[in-house]
Amino acid sequence: MTEHRDSNFIIANNARYGWHPMAHPGDMQKNPPRIVTAAEGVEVIDIDGHRLLDAVGGLWNVSLGHSAPSVKQAMVDQIGRMAFYNTFRGTTNDRVIELSVALREFFAPEGMERAFFTSGGSDSVETALRLARQYQRIIGQPERTRFFSLKYGYHGTHFGGASVNGMNKFRRQYEPMLPGCHHLPAPYTYRNEFDSEDAAVIARGIAARFEAEIAFYGADTIAAFIMEPVLGSGGVLVPHETLMPLMREICTRNGILMIADEVICGFGRTGAESGSRLWGVQPDMMTTAKALTNGFFPMGATLISGTIAEAFETASGADGTLSHGYTNSGHPVGAAAALATLAAVKAQGVVANAAARGEELRAALERLKQKHEIVGDVRGKGLMAALELVSDRATKKPLDKGPVQALFDATYEAGVMVRTSGNNIIISPCLVVEPADIDRIEAALDTGLKAAANAR
Ligand SMILES: Cc1ncc(COP(=O)(O)O)c(C=O)c1O
């Protein structure tokens, strides 16, 4: 057994030598992050033994809760039998074959026929973007290289994903991005350029903009359009139910592939098996990761429709060859975790629970909005929700960093972990939460909102 260092050592070295994603390394040294040392059910426990309801759900990914014994056991069994073997041309493993069949069954309504395995969401997006260009070449349209996406969309941090990413903060320090990536307005009812709060009007506006851009650049230069069915990291923006079908129709009519980025939405988070199913759309590709393995193994899958699959599988030689892949594509431990996760998601009625608890969560957040002036907007679908905080409801001025941090700290002390992102409070608990857990989130946020208002 490896000896672990004592808690004084851990606290002294927190954020000193390890840099954190999406954070300023100097700030992290001055204000070290909370140290979580254990997790159980829908809760986590910090280094001081403080127990909290995890309203972050790991990071949108731990859908079955942190215990998930069947997933852990499947991983342990697989590690004992074979902890790794590669799936590059010439070899494979039994678990990943099983997983490719299970995913095809799970996403049959979306028409997903094939899976390409990756090490996470950014990889899945990169894979989909590359396959989109390759597909267009295979069918004799090599000039189709452009990508369209939505502002406020988040598609990971590889250069392709960052280039279609719709948030300035993830792009600016790393420019120039990939050429030929274009952004459409976001389905953001609270703030938008259409001067409307009507989600249906905004959806029509986005679709009209897409049509205009296609006419300007030429459909024959566009490879794919990528969108999150519900935009997650951008602040849980829930489009009108017509948006994704409208975009699907435009893509089909113009020979543009539609990629649904299901890294957050996939496997039940929205209260449906996928965001595409929620909106009744069959995309050409779906990118998945996160809850695929209940967050217990870094694995993703890019899922591919029958039409795209056929083009690749019947293309000659180099045209159809996938010169793309990762050492960990099809990792057997990840595949074992995913198989156990999919089985548990089905057996435990997790998707229906996410839908029902989601309704309760949104009602709770609406009550908080009634009580607290600093809540400007409440958004959500299933168990992904956000509170957008403002210092003034009339001007919608975003709440400053200080009060947002005060909210985080007070909510934490009140026993609930939430995530802050700019002036948004993101709530994405495990999909197995019970009604009493929603009550806990409401009570702790009530305390947190009071603290934020006082810190203004
Ligand atoms: C919609 C979406 N796509 C892609 C990614 C990138 O996934 P990863 O962080 O696993 O690379 C994320 C991560 O949050 C995401 O939310």
Image: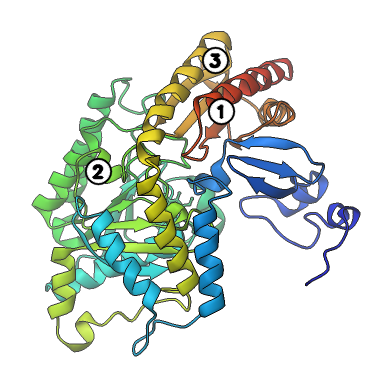
**Tag shown at residue 368:** 3
Q: Which residue is mark 2?
A: 277
Question: Foreground: 315 or 365?
Answer: 365
Q: Which residue is mark 1?
A: 437
Question: Foreground: 212 or 78?
Answer: 78
Residue under the point 23% across and 36% down:
243
What separation in Å lies between label 3 and label 1 (alpha carbons)? 16 Å
Residue 297 visible somewhere in the drawing: no
Residue sitting at the far top: 371
- 112 above or below 76? above
Q: Quadrant of residue 257?
A: bottom left
Closer to the camera: disc 2 or disc 3?
2
Residue under the point 55% across and 24% down:
436
Residue 208 visible somewhere in the drawing: yes
Say if disc 3 is inside 8 Å of ligand 1: no
Label 2 near label 1: C-beta < 8 Å? no
- 95 above or below 342? below
Residue type at mark 2 is: Arg
Residue type at mark 3 is: Leu
The numbered mark, 2 or 3, whose residue comes first in the sequence reads: 2
- 407 above or below 53? above
**Side of 281 relative to 236 (left or right):** left
What separation in Å lies between label 2 and label 3 (alpha carbons)? 30 Å
Residue type at mark 1 is: Asp
Q: How was the colour assigned to the protein in this rendering?
A: rainbow
| Label 2 Cα neighbours within 10 Å, binned few <14 / some 14-19 / many ≥20 | some
Question: Foreground: 1 or 326?
Answer: 1
**Side of 180 relative to 333 (left or right):** left
**Residue 84: % across, % down:** 51, 80
Residue under the point 21% across and 47% down:
213
Circle 2: element type: helix
Q: Quadrant of the C terminus?
A: top right
